[in-house]
Amino acid sequence: MLRQYMGIKGQYPDAILFFRMGDFYEMFFDDARTASKILGITLTSRGTLGEEKVPMCGVPHHASKSYVAKLVNNGLKVAICEQTEDPKQSKGIVKREVIRLVTPGSLIDEGEVDDKSNLYMAALSGPSTPQDRKKRATYGLAHVDLSTGEFRVTEAQTWEQLIEELSRIDPAEVIIPENTYLPKSETLSSYYRETLKRDAFDPGRAGDILREQLGVRSLAGFGCQDMTWGIISAAALVSYLQDNQKVIPGHIKELVSYRLGDYMFLDESTCEHLELLKTLRRQSVKGSLVQMLNKTVTPMGSRTLKRWILYPLIRIESIRRRLGAVGWFKDSPALREEIREELGKIYDIERLNGRIVLKRANARDLLALKFSLQRLPAVKEHLESSTSSLLSEIGLRLDTLRDVADWIEEAIHKDPPVSLKEGGIIKEGYDDKLDELISLSRSGKGWIAEFAASEQKRTGISSLKVGYNRVFGYYIEISKANMHLAPPDYIRKQTLVNGERYITESLKTMEEQVLDAEERRVALELEIFSKICDDIAIENGRIKETAHLISEIDALAGLAETAEANDYVCPEVDEGSDIEIVEGRHPVVEQTVRDEDFVPNDVHLDSTDHQVLIITGPNMAGKSTILRQTALAVLMAQMGSFVPASKAVIGIVDRIFTRVGASDDLARGQSTFMVEMNETANILRQATPKSLVILDEIGRGTSTYDGLSIAWSVAEALHDRGGKGVRTLFATHYHELTALAASKQRVKNFNIAVREWNDQIVFLRKLVPGGTSRSYGLEVARIAGLPEEVIVRAREVLESLESAEFEGRGRSGLAHPSSKKDEEELLQLNLFNPHDDKLRDWIRKLDVSSMTPLEALTELHHMKEYLDYETDN
Ligand code: ADP
């Protein structure tokens, strides 16, 4: 047996092998040591190998799911090895085989999956050598949710874009090719990765693999025929599922290809800073936009809403259709209520469908599907009469799958057990052969009941019982006091404390009949059940489409519910460049401010006059809030939601960029100022005239003058970008920045009003035109509880600093347009003297890739010595 174990383990060296033995999964050797620690189960041993005892631990198979989940959540993968033949029939050691490999991306059965989120597995591919990369800088990215069958593919022009998209998908597992020259990425390394051999990414086979999986002759119907790398990634995913995970993903019959430009572009830090799916500090769903908006009543609806938040639309027509549907639902409260009530009874048919196709469904799953499908006709009827074009179309398209519901209704018992091995899942009257077996086993049981009565009569023992247990089968039980009355044909089987158990020839004969009929009944029921599942699985495409439409209805009705509950307004979206928000509010903050009511604010941005708004005001005044609420209003409008304002006009935005100053960004471990500058550089490269840029206190993570100068030049660059500029909201406590408005035509100053009162400040939360001349830092520090003597001393220091500043070049000097600096001054700014050719050549000639760290350090040391020497001389 151990030899068999070793053979199988050899094929899965990096997985924990769950080796099925009877009712247990056993683990041996290092697997046992690792797993017993993580799972908190006892480590025992079994037999010896050479001198050594073999360490072992095990878990009962019926409770294995939670153990598997725990191991996988600890970063391990688990190979499930089953007995693949009946131990009764086998000679020698039972055959065993790994039937499934469980990794974070395939952990769909283990009861740990959040039903409000998708569970994605992604694969990425790209040029395999640095030279290739220069030639065709394109990358492919595919992702799949095994539980629902959703399968998507896209391509990115640059590595950065690919990574941004990967973070938006946020997969549980990423498949990458072995030995590639994919650039390094922290985001990528933060995911669970599986490396596959290069031939899984073979361009020559990719098309065939995909066509075969999808059951089509050509990929043209999926709009991805020109996505070379996309197809390679998608095919790698399919082979991974089939070969490594050993699943036959019959429900993956459709591939949705999309281009990054089809949706509003949101990068990782924008999603984080706008707190779309979770809050920045606590990483909790509570307090995020999704939690605020989500009033859906099905898990499918929740998942769709999440996708809408992450993928806002940019085509006006599609946005208006969604808004129209939300509007219709909002204006028809009674119908909305009725529809939502029906939807609320619908189970997760998308995942039920997946389970049926993957052969993991039980009878209760089928009942849940049937029950859900029976809710559909009412929903369909309501929608067909809707005046919203989107909803009436959904109503028309909605397939109520009557046939599937009927199959289940006819066949499946209305109260089946969870296990498929007990019988009782198929209704009587459904199958003649089954009925025969049922009556056989029933009449046998009837005979046994009568047998007990007749034996009581025959022996005169009124307390005589007939019972059953798994070891002895049926038996007659007589108490001690009556033992002497037992007739001679009774065969003694077991002695108890208070009595004796017997069998008789006729009882045993009947028992065989009953048990045999039972066994055949269970087997036949299982066969019928599988056949029904197979029939339903053939219809999986229709079920998936229905699930998809239900999820959209649910998301739209949910948005209407939110809009009504919170008094949102329908935004007007157009191709113009104005963003006008009247009495806008922050959807989340307005719910949380308690002792003061939320103060609404107007924001107007355009590309001719109010393009870059510099918003000043003390800390805590509400700058971040106004920035975020503007970005959120745009995002919500483009996902098809109403917005928290009394009026909103949104000129379509192609990308939202959000950067928050380093000191506000505690969540990231690395040099925060560096991250911030990286991200800012990224905005300056990518923003278009249709983008919206939100900059909150950038340039704070360094000294005041450095920070101010960076903030200044970034604001200028955004104003000047491409000659047309970018719509920007720039919050800063550097009140000096307001001088920019004097030199840049489309820069406007605003501030959040505060009032000084008795040497204190009162926050008015109102955005008003004009700049501020002070930062009120000391006043805010006082509110925060800094001791009075510290505040007094700080005021002294501030005064002396400010007077020094005026003695120098003066603040307004910042507004001077940049002048050509003389060469000497520029040289100071450069790290290396451009005339120092010796040092440059030295560095150029170094072959860094072949150096050891120690050699590199030594080299660096020499350079420093050289520089010191040069400076001294
Ligand atoms: P800043 O960015 O200027 O430091 P924030 O935007 O973080 O200030 O706001 C600080 C707090 O003020 C918020 O957490 C919120 O409680 C409150 N606040 C902000 N804007 C408003 C508003 N318009 N109405 C009421 N309270 C607000």
Image (cartoon, rainbow, N blue to C red):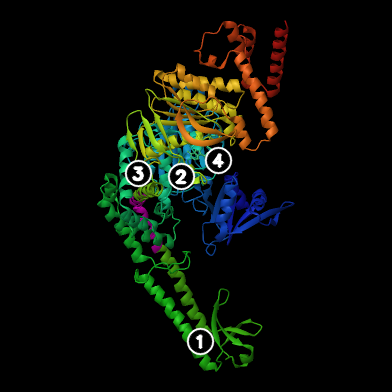
Residue at numbered disc 1:
452
Q: Which mark is residue 192?
A: 4
Q: Relative to 65, is 839 on the left or the right? A: right
The answer to which image quadrant residue 726 occupies is top left
Magenta stretch encompasses residue 594:
no
Residue at numbered disc 3:
215
- Depth check, mark 4 against mark 2: the one in front is 2
Name the amino acid, label 2.
Val
Disc 4 and disc 1: Cα gap in Å?
Answer: 63 Å
Q: Nearer the viewer, residue 149 or 744?
A: 744
- Depth check, mark 2 against mark 1: the one in front is 2
Q: Secondary structure at mark 4?
A: loop
Mark 3 or mark 4, earlier in chain:
4
Residue placed farthest to the right in the image?
A: 51
Q: Relative to 213, is 184 on the left or the right? A: right
- Depth check, mark 4 against mark 1: the one in front is 4
Q: At x 53% / y 48%, what residue is drawn?
A: 101
Is there CB contact under 8 Å for labels 3 and 2? no
Q: At x 53% / y 24%, what residue is drawn?
A: 773
Q: Nearer the viewer, residue 261 or 181?
A: 261
Residue at numbered disc 2:
290
The answer to which image quadrant residue 651 occupies is top left
Disc 3 and disc 1: Cα gap in Å?
Answer: 61 Å
* Category of crowding for the residue at label 1, using alpha-carbon neighbours closer than 10 angstroms: few (below 14), some (14–19), many (at least 20): some
